[in-house]
């Protein structure tokens, strides 16, 4: 195996383009830098073409420099993996359903701004994909809308999220006839959510399927756009509504008998959470309702 010190000397020499500056940076003599380069060229052939004004890499030199960079990246990745208890740097990986994800991701970006050593990796996914991603250790943290039953996981309540009937600002919604006049903006979970909430708000109603459908979107961040334009009403989880930028363009119907779902936090049970994951969870819980 090639001496790592030789590779460090070569990589820095390529950056500095000076034997003197390289030696000074490494705290060794210029002769030592030349010796390291000679050892490497004995292994790989000519690496550098030197002239009075130029310092060029041969194809072998370019390949070796790329190898040095890959080693440095791998070293950094290993360092991050081993710093599990350091809450100020490393990868925070979270996979969530849409509504809670719309709320959590911007909050985690704010945490990253205060701690630039962190890297946020977030994915939107349905419950089944969240479950498999955490079980397969592709994500350290997951949020689900149902409690999983798997001994390999720790599952604990993370947040409570009510369903909300959202309609255009300035409109009146007091009866089923008002909903009929507005029409329904549907989404993949729209009819199921609307059925659950409207059975509480308007007992004995003829069902959401009886309402005219005024549109459909499978992008949770866009569902409220037609509502804000006065094109209909919808039923969404609260965090999806809070993530919408045009809050002044929409209204939420008060519900005296709310429908509230529990959001479950999951992670592997066999090993403790990393320090950075614990810090992220504490940050989210402090700011989630803000």
Image (cartoon, grey):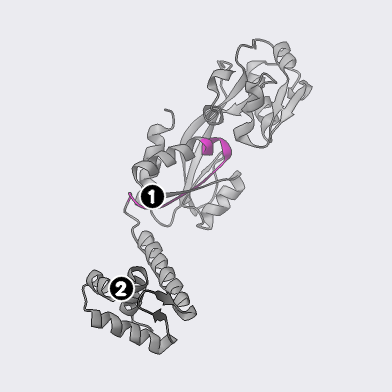
Q: Is residue 182 above or below residue 35?
A: above
x, y percent for residue 190: 68, 30
Q: Say whether disc 2 or disc 1 marks the residue closer to the N-terminus.
A: 2
Say which residue label 1 marks.
118
Q: Could you tell me which secondary element the residue under label 2 belongs to?
A: loop
Task: Identify which residue, 52 or 138, lies in the foreground.
Answer: 52
Task: Identify which residue, 184 or 68, lies in the foreground.
Answer: 68
Q: Residues within 10 Å of mark 2 (few under 14, many from 20)?
A: some
Q: Is residue 214 visible?
A: yes
x, y percent for residue 108: 43, 41
Q: Residue 33: which quarter of the image?
A: bottom left
Q: Is residue 196 visible?
A: no
Give the mark toward the camera: 2 or 1.
2
Say which residue label 2 marks.
18
Task: Identify which residue, 289 or 17, lies in the foreground.
Answer: 17
Q: Could you tell me which secondary element the residue under label 1 belongs to?
A: strand
Q: Is residue 99 magenta?
A: yes
- The stretch of residues the image draws in magenta is 87-102
């Amino acid at each position: 195996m090639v001496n790592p010190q030789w590779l460090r000397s070569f990589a820095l020499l390529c950056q500095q383009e000076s034997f003197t500056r390289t030696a000074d940076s490494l705290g060794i003599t210029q002769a030592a830098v030349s010796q390291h380069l000679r050892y490497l060229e004995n292994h790989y052939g000519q690496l550098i073409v030197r002239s009075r004004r130029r310092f060029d890499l041969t194809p072998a030199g370019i390949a070796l420099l790329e190898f040095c960079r890959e080693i440095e990246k791998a070293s950094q990745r290993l360092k991050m993996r081993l710093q599990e208890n350091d809450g100020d740097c490393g990868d925070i990986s979270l996979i969530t359903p849409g509504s809670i994800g719309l709320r959590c991701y911007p909050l985690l970006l704010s945490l990253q701004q205060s701690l630039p050593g962190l890297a946020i990796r977030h994915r939107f996914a349905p419950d089944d994909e969240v479950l498999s991603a955490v079980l397969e250790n592709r994500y350290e943290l997951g949020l689900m809308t149902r409690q999983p039953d798997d001994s390999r996981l720790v599952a604990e309540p993370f947040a409570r999220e009510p369903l909300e009937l959202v309609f255009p600002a300035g409109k009146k919604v007091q009866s089923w006839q008002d909903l009929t006049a507005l029409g329904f903006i549907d989404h993949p979970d729209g009819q199921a959510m609307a059925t659950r909430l409207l059975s509480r708000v308007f007992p004995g109603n003829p069902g959401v399927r009886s309402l005219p459908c005024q549109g459909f979107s499978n992008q949770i961040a866009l569902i409220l756009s037609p509502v804000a334009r006065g094109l209909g009403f919808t039923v969404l989880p609260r965090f999806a509504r809070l993530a919408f930028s045009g809050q002044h363009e929409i209204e939420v119907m008060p519900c005296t008998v709310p429908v509230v779902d529990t959001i479950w936090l999951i992670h592997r049970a066999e090993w403790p959470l990393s320090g950075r994951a614990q810090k992220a969870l504490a940050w989210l819980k402090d700011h989630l309702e803000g």
